[in-house]
Image: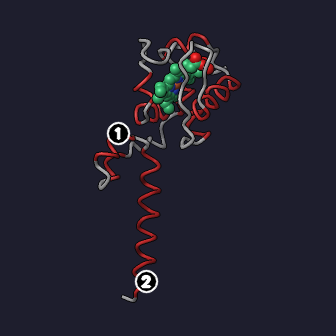
Amino acid sequence: MTKNATSIFAIAWVAASLALYSCGSKKESVKEDYGTPQETIDAPDVAADPITQGESLVKASDCKTCHHINNKIIGPSHTEVAKKYEFTKANVELLAGKIIKGGAGVWGEVAMTAHPEISQADAERMARYVLSLDGETEH
Ligand code: HEC
């Protein structure tokens, strides 16, 4: 193999690893086990509905460091969030924006960190899951 071909392979490998790595967003486990990105990916079931996909995404992300379904930890419980907001398209977009950009001042002094690595579509799935927790359906 020529030198050039080798470096092209190396670049492709790094690019592929980065692509895989960025899907997982399980920061803690990825840090400890950088070598096996496959294990860190919780690919949401594409056939599942957005709420189920949102649930997998929330579980695979760092949300649980600050949010519990029913109990306030650092952030409000996700069920409290669901009760506060009506399950409408406008609120899905509002909360998806907060998930990506972070937020502060609605629930208290503590701010939510930004998640710029989460896509708008995934953030909306997460928001739909959160908004479904009080049993409301989208309207
Ligand atoms: C570093 C801690 C932290 C992490 C990590 C975190 N949050 Fe939050 N979250 C907060 C805090 C604190 C608030 C309340 C912010 C406020 O008062 O406006 C909040 C608020 C929210 C809200 C309500 C926003 C509003 O304006 O009412 C939603 C929805 C939410 N978080 C979803 C998520 C999701 C989904 C994730 C994972 C991708 C996540 N959060 C990760 C701390 C966090």
Task: Return the residue at label 1.
Answer: 28
Task: Return the residue at label 2.
Answer: 5
Circle 2: residue type: Ala
Image x and y of residue 70, in percent: 42, 12
The C terminus, quarter of image: top right
Mark 2 secondary-structure assignment: helix
Q: Residue furthest right?
A: 90
Residue at 57% x, 41% y: name it: 116
Q: Residue furthest front?
A: 109
Circle 1: residue type: Glu
Q: Residues within 10 Å of mark 1 (few under 14, many from 20)?
A: few
Mark 1 secondary-structure assignment: helix
Image x and y of residue 124, in percent: 60, 33
**Callouts 2 and 1 close, C-beta under 8 Å:** no
Which numbered disc flags the more N-terminal residue, 2 or 1?
2
Residue at 68% x, 26% y: name it: 89
Q: Residues within 10 Å of mark 2 (few under 14, many from 20)?
A: few
